Amino acid sequence: MITSETVAGPLGRFANRLKREILTNVTPVRWAADGMHEERRRKWAPHLPPLDLAQAGLVSTLQRQGVRIGPLDDLAIPTTDALKPALDRLVAPLANLPTGGASTLRPSTDDLLADLFIWQWGLQDRMLDIVENYLGVPARYYGADVRREVGNSQTVGVRRWHRDAEDRRTVKILVWLNDVDDQGGPYAYIPLAETLYAVEKLHYVAGFVDDARVADMVPAGAVTAATGVKWTAVVADNCRLLHRATPPIARDRFSVTFTWSSRTPMKTEAAPDYTPDQARRIRSGLSARQLACLPPALACG
């Protein structure tokens, strides 16, 4: 049966694009959808967890700028000390995989789940407290995406300018698993004010934007590249910022991305491709709060 969690392929992409077009361009529909979302935020406001100064500072930065770049350790998320060696164990075999002409390589799902620290890291209460306060509603968590971006200079996929279309707001944490310089494929973004100007002038709804069109709208000096040493963390709302994975030239880039949205996202996502045993492993040891953050296809069974 096709549900809101299982639509995929060309039909799913068409449906998501049509939904985004309607929500953007049909004013009464947009007003109604925005009104329902604000009502959800209003009802949840009394239940938002309290934050310490560091957490509140991060939320404030995301609200004002849409991005924060700094050491992963600054987030003070429990199990980060166990996360790092688990990720290191994934990078070595991933680095030795033949590319087969691909621009992006990922470990197998079994390899990714060999150390549950990796997938479950984003379900720590401290992290959920930050995300929930930024979103204003309960969070949905999509797990970890470990990637090797091959240094082939190809401008394909997310290496082109775009905004994510999952929701009104998201939180993504992108962590460098090797040192990343200007030629190593850094995350690049256009600051919020310049993004909003470009989006308006381009009549942008969703999809990729050519470099030349972006260059016409945005001064070259406004583009910011998030270079950094290993374990640098980019915390960003990619639904608000025009951004890209700059094509790596001199060397491959290794990273892990953790993603959260609301539980009523604007984009219909395909059901995660996990076996029943893999789904049981993901759920193992999770609290009721953590289970509630999983996509429906993972949260039961």
Image (tube, rainbow, N blue to C red):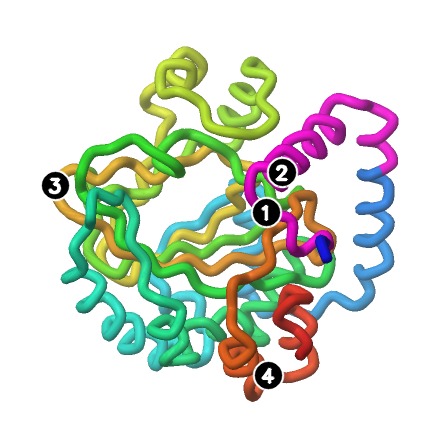
What residue is shown with label 2?
A: 11
Magenta span dominant secondary structure: helix
Mark linked to residue 250: 3
Horizontally, residue 272 falls left or right of residue 37, namely left
Image location of residue 230, percent across then percent down: 23, 60
Label 1's element? loop
Q: Residue at x 41, y 11 (%)?
A: 216
Residue range highlighted in magenta: 3-32
What residue is shown with label 1?
A: 8
| Dot 3 alpha-carbon crowd within 10 angstroms: few under 14, some 14 to 19, many 20 or more | some
Label 4's element? loop
Image location of residue 93, percent across then percent down: 19, 68
Is residue 27 a member of the stretch shown in magenta? Answer: yes
Residue 45, located in which quarter of the rendered image? bottom right
Horizontally, residue 223 falls left or right of residue 44, namely left
Mark with earlier residue (3, 2) = 2
Mark with earlier residue (4, 2) = 2
In the rendered picture of this protein, how many numbered marks are placed on residues? 4
How far apart marks 3 and 2 lie (CA) works out to: 37 Å
Label 3's element? loop
Label 2's element? helix
How far apart marks 2 and 1 lie (CA) works out to: 7 Å
Mark with earlier residue (1, 4) = 1
What residue is shown with label 4?
A: 286
How far apart marks 3 and 1 lie (CA) works out to: 35 Å
| Dot 4 alpha-carbon crowd within 10 angstroms: few under 14, some 14 to 19, many 20 or more | some
Cβ–Cβ under 8 Å for marks 2 and 1:
yes
